[in-house]
Image (cartoon, rainbow, N blue to C red):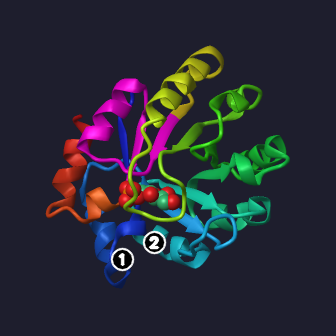
Amino acid sequence: MKRLIAPSILSADFNRLGEAIQTINQSEADFIHFDVMDGVFVPNISFGIPVIKDVNKIAEKPLDVHLMIVNPDKFIVPFAKAGASYLTVHYEACPHLHRTIQSIKEQNVKASVCLNPHTPVWLLEDIIAELDMVLLMSVNPGFGGQKFIENTYKKVAQLKELTERFNPDCLIEVDGGVNYETGKKLFEAGANVLVAGSFVFNAENSIETIKNLKLL
Ligand SMILES: O=C(CO)[C@H](O)[C@H](O)COP(=O)(O)O
């Protein structure tokens, strides 16, 4: 089973963003995770297309871009052009999710859907076959450094059942409150990709922390 790590630059020191990207480049991380927030879908604003475009010039890992925004359809082409390898949209922000997923795929970008902590996994039954990845939020989106929501383990197991039935290649990603303890249980429950922000960037040795997370 794939066990991948996606450090989230939300917790990096933006004054030294280039150094944070080089750290990820040198590490065993599999993706670089970007949390794009619009201040409408979530109660915070982070960064957007110009930052991702510039990071893409030096990034040596695929860019995993999580859009916490309303109307994501409007921005699929610009984020694809900025260098996104994966684009994740929120189930809760997409009234025409099937169309949104097709638009992402038309850009030759991997398509992913995110569920907030309160959104049940079974709602994906009729779209799962189209997806490259599902992202389960294990905190309410908007801020790094929050406490992990325990109900997520159950959701990972439910999602694993769904992917095994309809799309075994679909990756299961989890984001929020990931550390050695939660990360180990998430991998055991069936997660493939762990997003880690504060645990990686607040660590004394980020490269070592990423390596240890992969070995859980
Ligand atoms: O999506 C996010 C917030 O909306 C962050 O990626 C997530 O919370 C990771 O941060 P941490 O690892 O510090 O919990």
Residue 197 in the image: x percent, y percent?
Answer: 36, 59
Q: What stretch is highlighted in magenta?
A: 172-196
The residue at the point 44 percent across, 31 percent down is: 153
Q: Along the line of sight, which residue is nearer the eye, 122 or 88?
A: 122
Residue 42 in the image: x percent, y percent?
Answer: 62, 65
Q: Do the residues labelled 1 and 2 touch (CB within 8 Å)?
A: yes
Relative to 16, 127 lies left or right: right
Rendered-image quarter of ligand 1 = bottom left
* Total numbered badges shown on the rendered structure: 2
Q: Along the line of sight, which residue is nearer the eye, 12 or 145?
A: 145
Q: Can residue 20 be seen in this view?
A: yes
- Farthest residue in the bottom direction? 15
The residue at the point 62 percent across, 51 percent down is: 88
Disc 1 secondary structure class: helix
- Residue assigned mark 2: 55
Residue 95 in the image: x percent, y percent?
Answer: 84, 49
On whether residue 180 falls in the magenta region, the answer is: yes
The residue at the point 68 percent across, 29 percent down is: 128
Q: Along the line of sight, which residue is nearer the eye, 72 or 54?
A: 72
Within the image, what quadrant is residue 26 found in?
A: bottom left
Tag 2: Cα neighbours inside 10 Å, few (<14), some, or many (≥20)?
Answer: some
- Farthest residue in the top direction? 165
- Residue assigned mark 1: 17
